[in-house]
Amino acid sequence: MENASKALIMAAGVLIGILILSLAVFLFIDFGATSKGIYEKMEEKQLTQYNAQYTVYEGRSDITIYQIITLRNLAEENNIYYADYTEYKNNTDYKVQIELPSEMTGKENQDLIDKYNVVNAQGDLIHKFKCTSIEYYPSGRVKKVKIQQ
C-alpha cells in the first residue's frame, strides 16, 4: 500500500511536469507569433511613412516648380543615403527616380525656377505640373514618380 501511494505521487509529479512544459512551449510559440505580428506592423508603418513622402503628389495636377524641386531633392538625398550602406548597394529597391519632362532634366534648380515660376495678371502660376503615375518595387517601396506638364 505504501508503494502504491509513492507511485501515484511520482506519476502525479510527472504529469504536472509535462503540464508545465506544455504550458511553457505554448506560451513561447504564442509570444513569438505576437512579436512577429508587431514587427510586421512596424515595418508596414515605416513603409507607409516612407512612401507618403512621394505619394502625396499622386493624382495631383497643381504641382508647382518648388514642389518638383523638393521632390527631386528628396529622391537624390534618399539615393545618396542608401548608397552609403553596403548592405543596400546591391539592392535596387531603395533607389527612387523622378521622371520629369525632357526639357527639365539636367537643369539647375535656379534655371527651373526662373523658367517655370511665372505668374499671370491675377497672380496665379502659369506653369503647373501633374503627377501621372507612381511605380512601386515588389517590396512596396516607391520606385518612380512621373511628372508631366
Image (cartoon, rainbow, N blue to C red):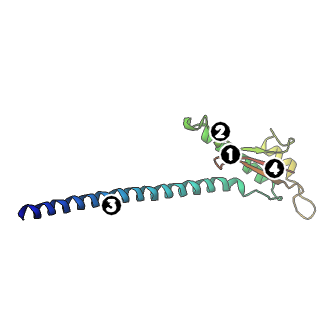
Q: Which residue is mark 3?
A: 23
Residue drawn at point x = 24 percent, y = 58 percent: 17
Tell whether label 2 touches label 3 (CB within 8 Å): no
Q: Earlier in the sequence, mark 3 or mark 1?
A: 3
Query: Which residue occupies the extreme front position in the image?
Result: 1
Residue 146: percent from the left, percent from the top?
A: 79, 48
Q: Secondary structure at mark 4?
A: strand
* Disc 4 versus disc 1: nearer the observer: 1
- Residue 107 bears which disc, if any? none
Q: Whole-Å distance between the Cαs marked 4 and 1? A: 18 Å
Tell whether label 1 touches label 3 (CB within 8 Å): no
* Disc 2 versus disc 4: nearer the observer: 2
- Which amino acid does the dot numbered 1 rest on? Tyr
Q: Secondary structure at mark 1?
A: loop
* Disc 2 versus disc 1: nearer the observer: 1
Q: Whole-Å distance between the Cαs marked 3 and 1? A: 42 Å
- Which amino acid does the dot numbered 3 rest on? Leu
Query: Which residue occupies the extreme right position in the image?
Result: 121
Q: Residues within 10 Å of mark 3 (few under 14, many from 20)?
A: few
Q: Whole-Å distance between the Cαs marked 3 and 2? A: 45 Å
- Which amino acid does the dot numbered 2 rest on? Thr
Q: Earlier in the sequence, mark 2 or mark 1?
A: 2
Residue drawn at point x = 85 percent, y = 44 percent: 101
Q: Which residue is mark 2?
A: 92
Residue 9: percent from the left, percent from the top?
A: 15, 63
- Which amino acid does the dot numbered 4 rest on? Ile
Q: Whole-Å distance between the Cαs marked 2 and 4? A: 21 Å
